[in-house]
Amino acid sequence: MKGLSMTTLPPRRKRSVAAGLTAVGAVAMLSGCDDNNEQARFGPPTEVAAFQTVQQCVDSGQFDRDTCVAAQQKAFNEDGKAAPRFDSQQLCEEQFGAAQCQRRSEGGQSFFTPLLTGFLIGQLLNNNSSRYTYGGLYRDRRDRDGGWYTGSGAYLSPNNGYRYNVGSKAITTPVTTQRIQTRSSVVSRGGFGGRVSARSSGGWGGGRSFGG
């Protein structure tokens, strides 16, 4: 059975298909620009492992319990410094969900941060040897792909199972205290991380493989 070409379709159907193709093209362009912006900010992608709990980490078979515990503890220890900060509970919960933010204070300033929801383990190569690097993770409530974000807003794109792709600078740049974000700063970035609304599918492809 031959497929229908655009020239054999009735006018109304032809307009519908053309509109659909235009929409798909627009989404693809947004996704491509989105990934280019991500790489410009956080560098080329590399693969990391991400988990919610120590047991998940151990069950992956990739790490021993001591490594998993150390990774989670490092994430907890750095959370107060690395977590994104917002000037109101409402603004924080708009990004991360109801009851998913906590009040904190520092230097006479009060702000809200999302709850820590996971941790990552990456590998750094140095003089032909490797060592692990750890960090905390947060979930944007609007993310449909199941990915995480680092405190600096780098997106972990789901790869396979516990494997994710993330910009390499996200695991090599030292943790710094985050600025308090206002509504105008969040809007100007398109939300926390700046890529949720434009992304249509996860994965950058390429990059160094974790554990490889």
Image (cartoon, rainbow, N blue to C red):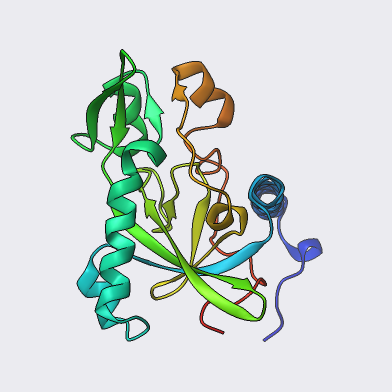
Residue 95 locus on image (x, y percent): 37, 34
Q: Does 46 sit above or below residue 77?
A: below
Left or right relative to 91: residue 160: right
Observer-nearest residue: 1 or 177?
Answer: 177
Q: Residue at x 39, y 73 (%)?
A: 162
Q: Does 19 sit above or below residue 88?
A: below
Observer-nearest residue: 106 or 144?
Answer: 106
Residue furthest to the front in view is 127
Residue 60 locus on image (x, y percent): 32, 81
Left or right relative to 21: residue 143: left
Q: Does 187 sit above or below residue 22?
A: above
Q: Quadrant of the N terminus?
A: bottom right
Left or right relative to 22: residue 186: left
Q: Quadrant of residue 8?
A: bottom right
Q: Quadrant of the C terminus?
A: bottom right
Q: Residue at x 32, y 73 (%)?
A: 67
Q: Residue at x 51, y 17 (%)?
A: 184
Observer-nearest residue: 19 or 135?
Answer: 135
Q: Quadrant of residue 98?
A: top left
Residue furthest to the right in view is 7
Q: Does 104 sit above or below residue 33?
A: above
Q: Residue at x 55, y 77 (%)?
A: 130
Residue 103 locus on image (x, y percent): 23, 26
| Number of residue marks | 0
Left or right relative to 169: residue 82: left
Residue furthest to the top in view is 108
Q: Quadrant of residue 88?
A: top left
Residue 22 locus on image (x, y percent): 71, 49
